Amino acid sequence: MTTEPAAVERRAVERVVVGAFGALTGRRSAPLHFAMMDDTPVGVLGLAAGARGLRRLSYVKDEDGFVERLLAEYGDVPVLRSTGLDNVRRALDRYFSGRRLDFDLAVDLSDLPPFNRHVLEATARIPPGEVATYSDVASRAGSPRAQRAAGNALHDNPVAIVVPCHRVLRADGSLGGYGGGVPIKEWLLAHEGARPAAL
Amino acid sequence: MKPPSPSERAAHHIAFLLAKHGGELARHIRRLVRDDDVAQDILQDTMIRAHGALSRLAAGSNERAWLYRIATNASLNHLRAKAREREALRRHAAERDAAVEPPADGRRERDDARRAALWAEVGRLPQRQRLALTLRIVDELDYEEIARRVGGSAAGARANVYQATKKLRLGVGAL
């Protein structure tokens, strides 16, 4: 039996699945790879990445739910369980262990509206241990008065933790909302050593 | 938002099955058929069959094992068809060569004939034995894994492989 280097086999397997997907659905596009992280301090996380970087990091209940969500949102691309995404896992492991709180990962926000992208890019520049307000990030995104829209953009952040929307608080220092639930926002901020002023 | 049409729902379901199991099924099929284009066709075929039969799958049954079974059967069907084709070609070539020139020393023909006979014997084995044997020899799986993919116990899988090899030895040895 011929043995193949794992990477060669992975690419061949990917071509087979993407080809079958294309033949079955008539849609030919680059695949989205997903992986699960089951026992993090903040629960189950679903990861998804395309060729240009990380596209999703979500709080999810289980794999089936995450796959359903990916298909609903990116319906026309083949979604593939990945044995890769190791760089993302390692970065998250380092983050949760506290060894390194910032991320050096390619993030692909290209399918978002420009305003949302600008808000998230401004958010990504808030360093660990610091916080900003909704109007701060609205200003940094070029629309100082659009703090409500900035709040919505953060609420729709597809890449939680890595794009640290949890570091954005209300002007009065209260926590505001969070997609994964406010207790997780609190946990992340405490983990980074940035306890909100109101607490 | 309008509700999805049946064909959209079907496409969605196939996409879901491919997302969950496509990678490992593709790996499994590739190892059986050793050809990426064929593997793609068989994976596609597997998904169509699975989709068609999904309503008949009992609630709570193991969807993954079931998909493996469909993929394995489709791969083995392909291998058998290919073996038949090869056999027909070999016969055709042998007839043509015999018409043109006398055989040199006949050794290659004997080897070819034995190989073709072996495949033919494999094709005659009962399905469970054939499956177990192919997964054991071609895919190099252990008995636990064979049992998981074709159903039954590891001991059953071992017995099937044993019976299959015994029959092949008798069948080919008798040539």
Image (cartoon, helix red, strand yellow):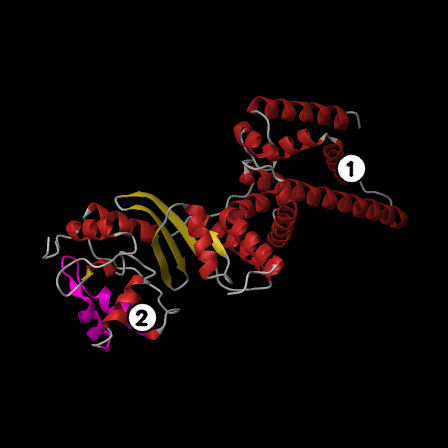
Residue A192 horizontal side relative to residue B19, left or right: left
Mark 2 vs mark 1, CA separation in Å:
67 Å
Which portion, as a residue range, is magenta? Answer: A115-143
Residue B42 horizontal side relative to residue B26, left or right: right
Q: Position of residue B94 (x, y in %)?
A: 83, 45
Secondary element type, mark 1: helix
Q: Position of residue A68 (x, y in %)?
A: 46, 53
- The answer to whether A66 is drawn above or below residue B151 in the figure is below
Foreground disc of the pair 2, 1: 2
Q: Amino acid at mark 1?
A: Ala
Label 1 marks a residue whose chain is: B
Q: Is residue A136 magenta?
A: yes
Q: Amino acid at mark 2?
A: Arg
Q: Which residue is mark 1?
A: B113
* Classed neighbour count for the residue bearing mark 1: other residues with Cα under 10 Å, few (<14), some (14–19), many (≥20): some
Using the rendered image of the protein, determine whether residue A95 is visible from the camera's viewpoint: no
